[in-house]
Image: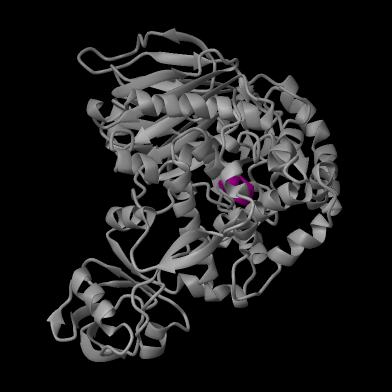
Amino acid sequence: MRASLAIFASMVLACGSVAARAQSAPPISLHVDLTDAPRKILHATEELPVQPGPLTLVYPKWIPGEHGPTGPVENMAGLVITANGKPVEWQRDSVDMFAFHLTVPEGATKLEMKLDFLATASPTGFSAGASTSANLALLSWNTLIVYPDGVNAAAVRVAPSVKVPSGWKFGTALTSGGTVVDKDCPLGTVCGPTTRFRTVSLETLVDSPVLAGRYFREIALAPEITPKHYLDMAADGPEELELSQDHIDNFDKLVRETGALYKSRHYESYHFLVTLSDEVAHFGLEHHQSSDDRVAPRTFVDDQMFVLNGLLLPHEFTHSWNGKYRRPAGLATSSYQQPMQGDLLWVYEGLTEYLGDVLAARCGIWTPEQYRQRLATIAATYDNRPGRTWRNVQDTATAAQTLYEAGGGWDNWRLNVDYYDEGELIWLDVDTTIRKLSNGRRSLSDFAAKFYGLGGDTPAKVVPYTFDDVVAGLNEVAKNDWATFLRSRLDSHDAHAPLGGVENGGYRLSYAETPNPWSAMEESDSGTVDFWYSLGLHVASSGIVSDVLKEGISDTAGFGPGMKIIAVNGRAFTPAVLRQAVREAKGAGPSLQLIVENTGFFKVLTLDYHGGERYPVLRRIEGTVDRLDDILKPEAK
């Protein structure tokens, strides 16, 4: 880990002279036109100060927070470069698809460039970047800019501006430098004003998306707190913006609880940019002074959806401290072309998942009981994940760039981004161990305040950390062999998940014959029926098998993902029929006879299972300290 810091330092020194030249040069001028966003095409014009001679331009490739080379260069189109009004030919690099070679002609002091971004990615799966619908647009600046290769993104200056459709409003962490009326708008067309922003570094620009929409609402949160916080929402209809005062109060409390937890803020202001639409992928992406949060249209007006998505904003907000301000050294790269190393993602994402869940409970988005119900599903999921016997959670972090598109059939055998939720179990173990060692006088909150509050309130900046830094920080709070503690869990191939935190918290993973309310909500939301802990199957209401538990009873019987259950014990399949058959088979009941279709072929599979229905729950361990309950208590005064 010290080697990672050494590499980082040498990289910065090597770029020093280039960075100095970049800082002394005039800024790049970048204007983005969103007026065609409803047609899923965004336009940009860029003016780049240059000197004559060979030049390589690059399109951002490794986007912070996406943990992979995900820059959507395949959707960049219409790149035309001119100098002094004459075309300049460019040639894409034959190896690096994100690099473009050209020669700046004599006498040229700037390049004028036009490029478009085609916001046509499917609204399913992981599709970060610019996304649009008829009534809203999320602008990710990295999708519409090229810049000179070999420069430090923090040193490159950019003067950005954006034009939105008439009648639209927007939210962003960028500071406005003034709004100008578009005098070039042709008569009879719909044009909107252009907003110029203050000049910022390329690093800050890429870290500051813009959410715009016809139906837009901004709510100031916890107004007594400085710096200021805003909930900026854009939706496909005005009714989706009418969240209740109770939910606004939850977000007010979230702002207050983060202050109590981290004892610091590292931004000038913070904007939650929430897209409420089914026309864009549902996910969250962290930024230092904002977050890109995309959820279903009724998330803020439907209480069940609000609860099911309750982690998203606390998680992304926590990243402002863990991931943006304090960042693993392997992810603290100086340009968007340099590969990132994800070995500490179990801290970056795993600890954020844990603290985000705790904050969701502390601010009232979840009740303590809902938190425990969700924790039961996480504990059971990772305690029934056979892939852990060949692949440890550390490898899922190291290989993160290959795993974000993974998932689906046999996922429990391949594994994917397990460092999120298994990481949460590890950090719960850390928290309860600190509380146990200190007899309740210290907790992970003390670590968070010291580690992420380093330097007190600061402007947005990056302070890298290593594994050794994490261990040292934990030892400042409670003396222990934390290196061995962490490595024994990260490198383990044990068949069972690290559930020490659950038990130190005063609870034990168990199973009941009826789903806990959280599991029931997830089933109704996803349309998937959960027979995972009984038959080892995830089944859609249509009968399609989405996954099979490796080495479970259905795997042994011959089931595979994609098969469709047609009938159960002679009756046409429905989830209720299958559940009833499982109940009737309990004890000495009859085995299940299932007619299954597989790519047009049919067969009968027998499941000799008699254990009844099983769903995860947490049960209180009598006579133990209820540390888990203490963890969930609000800290803000």
Q: Quadrant of residue 591?
A: bottom left
Q: Nearer the viewer, residue 9 or 410?
A: 410
User: Residue 618 in magenta?
Assistant: no
**Residue displayed at 56% across by 45% down:** 629
Q: How many marks?
A: 0
**Residue displayed at 72% across by 27% down:** 22
Residue 368 in sight in this render: yes
Is residue 516 positioned above or below 297 on the image? below
**Residue displayed at 63% across by 64% down:** 498
Query: At which x and y percent is residue 542?
Result: 21, 68
Q: Nearer the viewer, residue 198 or 493?
A: 493
Is residue 334 positioned above or below 30 on the image? below
**Residue displayed at 35% across by 76% down:** 561
Is residue 199 positioned above or below 75 on the image? above
Specify the color scheme: one colour
Quadrant where the C terminus sits is top right
Quadrant where the N terminus sits is bottom right
Query: At which x and y percent is residue 631?
Result: 60, 43
Give the left or right position of residue 598, taking residue 229 as reference.
Answer: left
Q: Nearer the viewer, residue 124 or 150?
A: 124
Residue at far left of view: 571
Q: Nearer the viewer, residue 403 or 374?
A: 374
- Image: magenta residue range: 349-354
Query: At which x and y percent is residue 27?
Result: 63, 21
Residue 334 in sight in this render: no
User: Residue 352 in magenta?
Assistant: yes
Query: At which x and y percent is residue 100?
Result: 58, 45
Provide the major secondary structure of the magenta segment: helix
